[in-house]
Amino acid sequence: MPIATELATAVALLTRLPVGRWAAAEPVDAVWAYPLAGAVVGAIGAAVLAGGRAAGMPSALAAIWALAALLLVTGALHEDGLADTADAFGGGRDRARKLDIMRDSRIGSFGSLALLVTTALRIAAVASLPSGVALIAAGALGRAALLLPLLLLSPARADGLGASLRRVPAGRLALAAVLGMAVALATLPAGRAVVAILAAAVTGLAMARLARRQIGGYTGDVLGATSVVAECVVLSLLSLRGG
């Protein structure tokens, strides 16, 4: 399968960008390109942030518009997974109930609070950064981090997008990790890139451990939640270090 087709498939799966006509690969074959799709999303947010600041917007307002652009481009796919995961892990009494909650389209208290907190974290962090390049790195590393639960766990249910990724070749996962790190190193100073990479890896491992304890595996919602949480952690640490 041509590389461009697999990349288009990753972009089509993770965003609403109009690349469907070229997305002919199987989802499992496109996993390696997830960090590149995340970098594309981050670049769009960075462009909006730069445009807002150039127009004279306060940093906080420009950051809100940048995050709005990210959510529009992705269709809030990962945020939906975060809300479902928070509701399930926070309100489910047992594994079966947690999995049922994940299928429920309604958002409860835990999900609402998770969305509120992660949105506020990203806006505050982005507003404090001198430029939007951190969004590119965070977008790539967030999509790389979600592959750790995929690597370490088995699907928690037999159907759904998560289950369709149960047999991702190790080589494609390794390539995704390398690409995520490469994007970070290409967009950030070396020391900050290393911090961001380690933060994303630790977040992915922590989310994998949490998912194992809660539902015995991963779902597509867990993968999406991992991406959002990793982005928040990466952006927060980059903010603390001055971008």
Image (cartoon, rainbow, N blue to C red):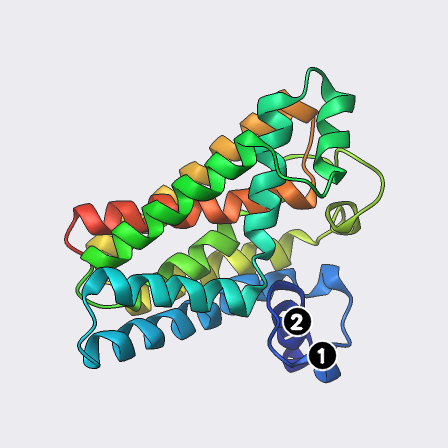
Residue at the (48%, 37%) spot, across then down: 114
Q: Secondary structure at mark 1?
A: helix
Q: Is residue 120 visible?
A: yes
* Residue bearing mark 2: 12
Q: Amino acid at mark 2?
A: Ala
Q: Gap in Å between the C-alphas at discs 2 and 1?
A: 6 Å
Quadrant housing residue 7? bottom right
Lower sequence index among marks 2 and 1: 2
Do labels 2 and 1 touch, CB within 8 Å? yes
* Residue bearing mark 1: 20
Residue at the (18%, 66%) spot, across then down: 58
Q: Give the quadrant of the N terminus.
A: bottom right
- Left or right for 116, reference 188: right
Residue 124: x %, y % from top left: 26, 50
The one of 214 and 60 positioned closer to us in this rendering: 60
Residue at the (21%, 74%) spot, across then down: 53
Q: Amino acid at mark 1?
A: Gly
